[in-house]
Image (cartoon, helix red, strand yellow):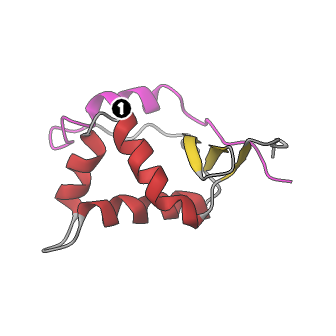
Amino acid sequence: MIRLEPPLRVATETDARALADLVNFAGEGLPLYIWEGLARDGQDPWEVGRARQIEKVREGQIVVVDFGDGAVASLTGYPIGSEPRPIGDDFPALFRPLQELENRALESRRLPRG
């Protein structure tokens, strides 16, 4: 892994609330819309967003900028497989452009830890 110097650091689970806010802000509200669709009856969609960020934190996929008062910016990365994901007629239109882009970046990987 790249050595991170302050104010950069690897995200932790305690950053989940800030990360959900940052992701939703960067996505101009689209993430919250998605989380609303994933929320079970009565579940807070922000809880869904925080849980999704915690999953990425546990996989070491997020780096944050922290000047001492918590995360104020973040960068999320993830590996992309070696085979394109099929985009059939039933593929959600909202995600089609993103999947088309990922299909052009096959075998992208995060940096190895160590």
In this view, 82 is above or below 12: above
Question: Picture coordinates of residue 110 (x, y %)?
Answer: 67, 42
* Residue 90 position within the rendered picture, expressed as x and y whole percent measured from the top left: 15, 44
* Residue that badge 1 annotates: 98
Residue extent of the magenta highlight: 88-114
Assign a secondary structure to mark 1: helix
Q: Based on the displayed image, in which of its 4 quarters is residue 43 positioned? A: bottom left
Q: Confirm whether residue 86 shows in the render.
A: yes
Residue at x-position 31% and y-position 27%: 97
Residue type (three-letter) at the residue carrying disc 1: Leu
> Relative to 29, is 7 on the left or the right?
right
Which residue is at a point 81% across and 46% down the rendered structure image?
Answer: 1
Residue located 79% across and 42% down the image: 6
- Which quadrant does the C terminus fall into? bottom right
In terms of secondary structure, what is the magenta stretch mainly? loop
Camera sees residue 76 = no
Q: Is 9 positioned to the left or the right of 101 in the image?
A: right
Q: Is residue 53 above or below residue 33?
A: below
- From this view, report whether residue 24 is shown above or below residue 54: above
Residue 3 placement (x, y as % from top left): 85, 43
Q: Is residue 83 magenta?
A: no
Q: Residue furthest front?
A: 69
Residue 68: x and y in percent read 69, 50
Residue 60's quadrant in the figure? bottom right
